[in-house]
Image (cartoon, helix red, strand yellow):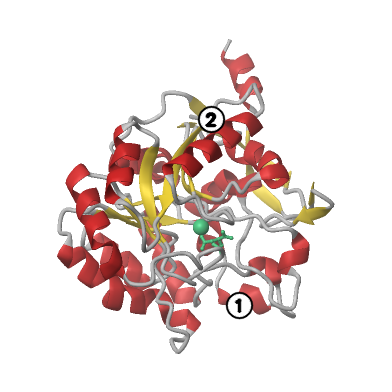
Amino acid sequence: MSLDTLTLRRPDDWHCHLRDGAMLRTVLPYTARQFARAIVMPNLAPPVATLEAVRAYRQRILEALPPDMDFQPLMTIYLTDQTDPDELQRGHAEGLLTAAKLYPANATTNSQFGVTEVRLIHAVLERMERIGMPLLVHGEATDPQIDIFDRERVFLDRVLDPLLKSFPALKVVLEHITTEEAAQYVTSRAGRMAATITPHHLMINRNAIFSGGIRPHMYCLPIAKREKHRQAIRRAAVSGSPCFFLGTDSAPHPARTKEAECGCAGIFNAPDALECYAQVFEEEGALDKLESFVSVHGPQFYGLPVNEAAITLRRGRRAVESRIAVDGDEILPFRGGEELGWSVVPFQQCMARER
Ligand code: NCD
Ligand code: ZN
């Protein structure tokens, strides 16, 4: 590997929002150009909460995929108070479902049909524990009295701790961690727990949301925290610990819905996700740890094979697109208009050079 190119095992995205319809067709190629697989979040409106809905959504994703792209969606089901353990088990047994997603009701975008109380899904969790199906958790307490910057930390004590104790063999991924406490929590439960880390939480702290004015495109949930937390999750990401792996939480919204009186949460980072991770690992002097974070720890935790294909990043400045048209509106990508230090070499060019 020369200093100016990085060739890695092809990565996967273990947390991604692909949406539906025109938005799906617009954003999917950005994900598929980098990632061989992605864990697809089920928070559509209405939520993807039955096997029938999961099957149909998977089909729509495959139909939206450009024919020359090699990409596999890994499907999740949205847990509700009514989820049927038998249905979940059937979906898992037939390979349709990779995992199930727990949104505490009203924690984030399209989570109003989420779980109101964990005790209502005890039978479901017990079944998942038995069949070895991972539970993916949006880890924020939903009590509106709790300060928004404390919601992840409070969730660990109030909700996650009792859940883990009740189901000691259940495998849990704490999604998009943002705090030092979450990183420590996961590390101390290595083996049964893992966490995804987004590019934006590695790159921005909460000042970015208020820099010179209010910045709706920097607003996501969990919300970015203080600098000491950003530093802590950067240390976790580059630590080499198998508990931590890539999950972009790429969450596109039309600009009109973010730049609004009550703008929605979500950062769209798919166009330059891998480049952002490479930049962070380089800044931390840890490029040698990049491949395990982006391509190995995820499949290891999920018990899936690692990808055999490779992807190459080339050093060199690349300007990130600043606006992407979609359905009469546009999406503003994370770092849009800025220059990043690495760029993914398009697949055909990699092949041509190897020949
Ligand atoms: C996500 C979305 O828009 O679907 N938003 C976000 O801020 N991350 C939902 C989520 O993952 O919380
Ligand atoms: Zn998400």
Residue beneath disc 1 = 207
168 on left or right of 301: left
Q: Position of residue 252 (x, y in %)?
A: 65, 55
Residue 38 visible here: no
Front-most of residues 350 and 33 = 33
Quadrant of res 151: bottom left
Instruction: In the rendered view, tell whether residue 252 sits above or below residue 132.
Output: below
Residue labelled with disc 2: 71
Quadrant of residue 78 within the rendered picture: bottom left
Q: Nearer the viewer, residue 78 or 194?
A: 78
Residue at 50% x, 61% y: name it: 202
Residue 196 got which mark? Answer: none
Residue 51, percent across and down?
42, 42
Give the mark toward the camera: 2 or 1: 2
- Tell me the kind of residue under disc 1: Asn
> Relative to residue 303, is residue 129 depicted above or below?
below
Q: Position of residue 220 (x, y in %)?
A: 58, 67
Question: At which x and y percent is residue 355?
Answer: 58, 10
For label 1, the crowd category at 10 Å Cα-Cα, with few meaning under 14, some 14 to 19 and many 20 or more, is some
Instruction: Pick out the residue farthest to the top.
Output: 355
- Please tell me whether mark 1 sits on a helix, a strand or a loop: helix
